[in-house]
Image: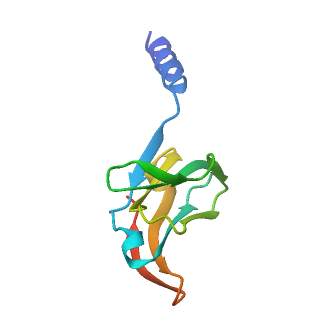
């Protein structure tokens, strides 16, 4: 009986749908300073992950996005820049799997000085 219960539980767990995690950076309007908003995402897991990167405004409306999900191999990094999109306020990253599988940041980049002015974590 115990073995049957364990097999039934395993079958249910294996049929569970895959999940995605959505993470967002704190907002800071890039257009006010003339900076570009760059979203950087690195896969720190041991398996490939699908990632969708979006730039959103203060109301949460998408103002720019990667055209589709990007597959990141382990250790691979991808960047998506909103330049110049004045209403881009923060980065939203959707990843297949756990939030622990990626490290991400929103970087406000000044093209005139070629420097990062603000770096915020995407959590």
Asked if residue 48 can be seen in this view, the reply is: no
| Horizontal and vertical percent position of residue 8 | 49, 15
Q: Residue at x 60, y 53 (%)?
A: 66
Q: Is residue 75 left or right of residue 60?
A: right
Q: From the top left corner, tell me how far across and down residue 57 is, in percent.
A: 38, 56
- In this view of the protein, which residue sits in the foreground, 87 or 74? 87
* Residue 122 vertical placement versus 12 (above, below): below
On screen, 118 above or below 11?
Answer: below
State whether residue 99 appears in this view. yes
Q: Which residue is drawn at 54% across and 62% down?
A: 41
Q: Which residue is drawn at 46% across and 72% down?
A: 107
Q: Position of residue 69 (x, y in %)?
A: 61, 46
User: Residue at 54% of width from left, 82% of height from top?
Assistant: 111
Residue 1: image quadrant is top left
Using the image as rendered, state which of residue 7 and residue 98 is in the foreground.
98
The percent coordinates of residue 16 (x first, y second) are: 50, 25
The C terminus: image quadrant: bottom left
Q: Is residue 69 above or below residue 78?
A: above
């Amino acid at each position: 009986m115990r073995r049957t219960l364990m097999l039934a539980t395993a079958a249910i767990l294996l049929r569970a749908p895959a999940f995605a995690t959505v993470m967002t950076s704190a907002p800071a309007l890039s257009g006010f300073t003339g900076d570009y908003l760059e979203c950087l995402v690195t896969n720190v897991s041991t398996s490939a992950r699908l990632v969708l990167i979006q730039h959103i405004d203060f109301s949460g409306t998408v103002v720019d996005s990667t055209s589709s999900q990007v597959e990141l191999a382990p250790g691979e990094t991808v960047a998506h820049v909103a330049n110049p999109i004045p209403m881009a306020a923060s980065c939203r990253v959707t990843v297949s799997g756990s939030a622990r599988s990626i490290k991400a940041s929103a970087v406000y980049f000044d093209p005139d000085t070629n420097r990062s002015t603000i770096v915020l974590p995407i959590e």
